[in-house]
Every structure is written in C-alpha cells, then in structure tokens.
Image: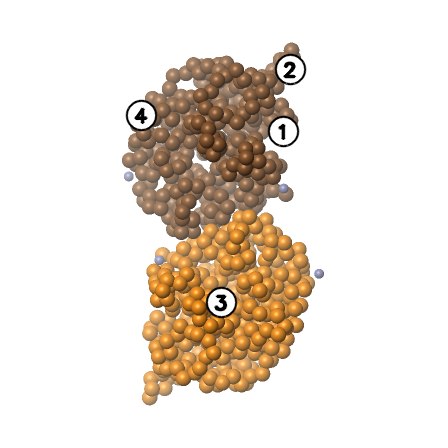
Chain colours: A brown, B orange
Amino acid sequence: EVSSVDYKTSHTVHLFPGLVNISAFVPGLLSPSDKDLEDVTKASLSGGFTTALLLPYGTLFQITDAASLDIAKASATGSAYCNYTFSAAVSATNAQSLDDEVQAELKSLFIPFRDLFAERSLSQQVAAVASHFASWSTDKPIITDARGSDLASVLLLASLNSRPVHVTDVRSKEDLLLISLSKAKQLRVTCDVSVYTLFYTSEAFGGVRCLPSKEHQEKLWEHLDVIDAFSIGTMPYELASELSKPTSASIGIEDALPLLLTAVSDGKLTLSAIQERLHDNPIRIFGLPDQSYTQVEVVVNRRAIIAGRKSSFWSPVDKLKISGSVNRVIVHGQTVFLDGTLLSAPVGRDISSATISRPAAALDRRGSMS
Amino acid sequence: EVSSVDYKTSHTVHLFPGLVNISAFVPGLLSPSDKDLEDVTKASLSGGFTTALLLPYGTLFQITDAASLDIAKASATGSAYCNYTFSAAVSATNAQSLDDEVQAELKSLFIPFRDLFAERSLSQQVAAVASHFASWSTDKPIITDARGSDLASVLLLASLNSRPVHVTDVRSKEDLLLISLSKAKQLRVTCDVSVYTLFYTSEAFGGVRCLPSKEHQEKLWEHLDVIDAFSIGTMPYELASELSKPTSASIGIEDALPLLLTAVSDGKLTLSAIQERLHDNPIRIFGLPDQSYTQVEVVVNRRAIIAGRKSSFWSPVDKLKISGSVNRVIVHGQTVFLDGTLLSAPVGRDISSATISRPAAALDRRGSMS
Ligand SMILES: [Zn+2]
Ligand SMILES: [Zn+2]
Ligand SMILES: [Zn+2]
Ligand SMILES: [Zn+2]
Ligand SMILES: [Zn+2]
Ligand SMILES: [Zn+2]
Ligand SMILES: [Zn+2]
Ligand SMILES: [Zn+2]
C-alpha cells in the first residue's frame, strides 16, 4: 500500500490496484453501430475500473447461444477501452445451446429475474434453471439479480447443487438477511450492492421505486461485512429513467469512486474496505486475472475536485459535497487517464476465457447478520 | 397383510391398519358451540381414519399461543370420535410465545402461506420464519402449504437449519419437481397430495382455480414415488365453495378411500401404496403412536356399495363409478363403524404430546423425478 499525505491541503493520495466494474450494463451490445460498449468502457477506465464484466441485463442485450455471443464478440472487438468479459443469460430453453465450447468463451452464467421472469416466477422455471445449474461449468461463476422469494429459489438450487452463486444488486434488508443466513450455514453465496443504493434513498427522490428506503439503506450499511462487493449495475440508469432524466449506459460509473471516497472522508468507510469490494473480492469471486503495473491513484479529503468536469448526462451527485476523486489511472505502466482526460486507445481485450481459480475459503466464512 | 377374495362377486376384502387423516380442516375449532370437530372426527372414523391431525388452515382457527391452545383443547374435550392432534400456526410475531411448554402440548408447527402471507411474501417474513426454525422443537414436525417460490423459501430455510419439513397439499408439477430435486439432494422433505387433486381436474369443473389441470394431475400420478402421503385438507371445501355448493368441514373425508380403492380396481394403484401413504409414512413422518387391535376393513372391486348412502353435503364423486368402500372400522378390538353406521361414542383423545421417533432413513432416500 502506497500512500502519501499532502500536509498543505490535508488530502491524501492513495493507490488502488486496477478496479473491477462487476456488473456493467451495455444495452446496445448486439447492435453493430451502437456506441454503448465504447461509452461504458471509457467511463469505467476514467472511473478507475480497468476491467468490466458485462452482464446481460434487460432484453435488448442477451447472449443466450453461440450466435449471439459471436455477434457480441464481433461488435466489441476494437471498441473497448478496458478489459471486459461476456456472460450468458439463462432462458427457459437454452441449457442445451450453452454447450462446453460456448461456455469456454464466457465468463459467467447470469440468471436474470427482473426482466426475463417478470411474468413467470422461478417456480415455473425451476426445471429450466435446475438444468442450467447441472450443466454449467463448475469453474465459472453463476450470477443472479433475483430478489425476495426468487432469491430463495436460486439459493435453494445453488445449495442443492453445491454451487457457489453471486447475488448482484441487493437492494433490501430482507435479501441481505437471507444471504447472511445462507453464509452462516456455509452456503457459498456472495453479493454486491450498487453504490447508488448505498448513497441515495427513495425518500430523497420523491419515493422512486428503484432506490431503497432510508431504513433499508441503513441496514445495508450496518451489515457491510455481508456485502462482498460494490457494483454500479442498472441502478443509475433506472433512477434517471424514473426521474425522466436523460440516460446513458455509462451513467453512474464515474460517480462510484468519488462517492465511496467521500464516505472515507466522512469516516463511514475505509480505503481497504473499498479495495476489498472493488478489487480483492471481485477477482477472487469471478476468477479474474490480476493486472500487472496497473494502479488507480485517488485523492481523498479534497473538495470539489470533480466540480468543474462536465458530463453529458444527469447525475444525482452533488459535486460540492464530494471530497474524493480519481487522479490518474495506470495500466501496464502506461498512464491512460489523467486529471479528467482519457489518454488511451480502445485496446481493451476480451478476458472471458481467462479464469483463475483462487482459494475461496476466506469468502465463505463471512460473518452472519446479528 | 390379511386379505380374502370373494370369488362369487370377485371382490376383495382387505384390512388396513388405522389410517391417518394428516391434514384435517376444522374451521370452527375455537368456537365453543361449533360442531366442526365432531363432524370431522365422525367422518374420519367412518372413512377409515382413526387419527386426525388438525391443521390450522385459514384465519378462523389458528392456535398461535398458549391461550388459543387452551381454548382449542377445552372445546375438543369430549367431542372427538377419533384421536386428534393440534398444530400451532406461525405468525410474524409468535416465535417467542410458542415456548417449550406450549410446544410440548402441540404435534407440529404449521407455516401457512395461502392465507396468512397472502399479502406479504415469505421474503418479507424471512426473519420471523427463520426464528421459528431456530426455536421449534427438533423432534416435532414442521409442516407448510407453501407453493412456488414460497415453497423454495421454506425448503431453503429448512435446509439452512438442517430441519425436516413436510409439504402438504401439493398441487402442481413444479412444486413436486422442487420437492423431488430436494429429496435427490438429501434434503429431509416429505409431501402429500390431496385425494381430490389426484381424481379431479380443473377442466372437468369449468376451469376452477383450486384443482390442477389435467397435465399437472398426470405429472403427479407419474411421480407417485415422490408423494409420501395422501391427504384431504381443504381441497374438497375449496372446490365446493368455488362451485357455490353447500360445504362442510367434513366434506371429502369419506370420499378418500372409495376413490383410492377404485383406482386399485382400475389398476392405477396398489393396496400397499395406499397403506404407505395413509398409514406407514404418516406415522413415521409425524411420529404418531400406532394403535393396537385397530383395523379398517375395506372392499375392492364391488360397485355402488356407497351409492345408497345419503350425505348432507355435495360431493363430486360419481357413486356409480365407485368400486371400493369401507366396510368396518375396529379400534382397540371394538367395532366402531359397520356398514355405513357409526357405533362409537366421542372417546377420541388428544395425542399431540405422544411423539414417537422412528428411523427416517427410508423416507429420506426416495427417488427423484426423471
Ligand atoms: Zn493508502
Ligand atoms: Zn459445440
Ligand atoms: Zn489486482
Ligand atoms: Zn442486524
Ligand atoms: Zn390384502
Ligand atoms: Zn412458559
Ligand atoms: Zn399402525
Ligand atoms: Zn418425469
């Protein structure tokens, strides 16, 4: 850990390893002329994320077989500014089409609930999901955004099949409790919470549906030890949509570190808690290769550093209250981002197949909620 | 096994041990002047059931604490025609009030979904249900009527707490599949299906909601090995209600054996399959005392034996198509029912506390669905 304190302005420069954007939302990925992947990977790199795991949220962008994977790979080639991975989405009928060869080219299997199964509950899809659990490669992660009793269903199937499962974008205290109970009973479950979920409440935005209530948000903070990772996901997009603000696939990505670093200034979070949840745990949970000579230089305790930057899309962040920012991003010894300017070419690579297995013991023994 | 074949009419007399009505619906139990328990236990004994497990279905009759248990016990004393047991219903707030002393006087814990949690899903109640799993006596069964993803939630909590759970009144192929998958993975789960569910379809009654579709019913028959017990439950009551027919708490009880014995005549079921699901498995799953010198004499392959009997309530049974019936019921050496006439006084006893532990291995190794 390398850090130095600038005594004159009492701010701290801190170095993180290359961070992971574990659930990037790229709705236009399957449209050849779309710029979503370019935008999302640019914003990721500028936000300190040197790797982006693309998750097939929604119905526009869904890799469900070899053909859609090929389209995604072709359209991604040469347009990504950071490394990236692909995930396949479970459908009721595609357990067979995700054969060994297709699996080898994918990072993870995503079991989507918020869209695909919106009309039909998992219980009606239990046979389909069970067959995926039985056939999906054991060294590649399974991720879900299930909530409530759908979450219980996925955890049960994971338990029945002795498979680890990662729950992305937890938003309620009940879901976190279920995950906590499962961890306490040695189920191999991990989870993440979106950064916006931790910093914005429904009450603060006229009762929007996507954000948690203040009470739920407090419980999430209280049980931060159960939360393995921070994510961005679809929450910023959903919030902007609910508020009828202009949106973009890359919305919220560059807000993540400034918000988290401000919480460090406020004494709510430590720098190592951030590194655990944006680097250490993500690379272990998802078996990602570590990047050599890759660093993210951030500043804590310096106000308004990003106040002057302009953004093409709406953000809930009150820049005057922000006291942390990303100064510089170095990938493989090269400065790719400095003082608000991206210096890189689109040299990001598809690292879906690069699975590194690490001991999971430390992840499995996390404390339960009390 | 004692059986004799009457060659002249080619019917068979067969003896069962005293059978168990594992989920008796007694809505008026907590009303002192109500005759539901009398009716239900009379019908049970006449139907070959020498024990009735009263389940707290619905919101009228719910034992949730010591006070309601006392009322139920007082109103039951001297009015039951067969042995009976009480179960407590889980509520969001009663984990504490079901203390050791109250538990000692109860047979089982019932986690109701179809009424209590109709508005709130289990996921919102997960803390409450989890605390019940943690505090309920390990030698007393936990029963639920949860379906769909609520069922998955209960199975997950049972698995996390290493507790057996019995699922009553399974109605869909998806729920049976989830139970089958759980059994295959050594979860200690057992289940029952209502007799009406096996013999009547939604299509045959103008699309009623309570009955399964023909397709679902066929799957239940196909996977009879996954079904540990047969029950009566609330299905007959629900069917009559949906069809706006006169109902009674005892509706359907006396139809059970005639329907099952007719399936024996038709070659769809064996007599030993019936005994397993109405006696052997129930006494093992629920730890019930066996009754000495207690027998149920039935006749198979004789048509229209019950066609002449009158009933005060509606039944879907076409008596002309029935080819089996209960001839005689003997309890402790005394004939209590003969040729349609009940000869017994209300001498049934509360056997809630009489828990007999038997090896559960045979129950846990049941085959999975294929
Ligand atoms: Zn430092
Ligand atoms: Zn192939
Ligand atoms: Zn690293
Ligand atoms: Zn707590
Ligand atoms: Zn016999
Ligand atoms: Zn007490
Ligand atoms: Zn017996
Ligand atoms: Zn089958």
Q: Where is residue A90 in the image (x, y as percent from the top left)?
A: 38, 42
Element type at mark 1: loop
Asked if badges 1 and 2 are on one and the same chain, I answer yes
Q: Name the residue under label 4.
A: A33
Label 3 neighbour load within 10 Å: few <14, some 14-19, many 20+: many
Q: Which chain carries label 3?
A: B
The first of marks 2 and 4 along the sequence is 2
Asked if badges 3 and 2 are on one and the same chain, I answer no
Q: Mark 1 lies on which chain?
A: A
As measured in the structure, the alpha-carbon distance from the residue carrying label 3 to the one carrying label 1 is 54 Å
> Quadrant where the N terminus of chain B lies?
bottom left
Q: Give the number of the mark in front: 4 or 1.
A: 4
Q: Mark 2 points at which residue?
A: A10
Identify the residue at horizontal 62%, vertical 23% (top origin): A265
- Look at the picture and state if B236 lies above or below B1: above
Identify the residue at horizontal 47%, vertical 56% (top origin): B147
Q: What residue type is labelled 2?
A: Ser
Q: Name the residue under label 3.
A: B233
Q: Which amino acid does label 4 sit on?
A: Ser
Q: Position of residue B50 (x, y in %)?
A: 53, 76
Asked if badges 4 and 3 are on one and the same chain, I answer no
> Quadrant where the C terminus of chain B lies?
bottom left
Q: Mark 1 points at which residue?
A: A268
Label 2 neighbour load within 10 Å: few <14, some 14-19, many 20+: few
Q: In which quarter of the image is ligand 6?
A: bottom right
Element type at mark 4: loop
Q: Which amino acid does label 1 sit on?
A: Lys
As measured in the structure, the alpha-carbon distance from the residue carrying label 4 to the one carrying label 1 is 43 Å
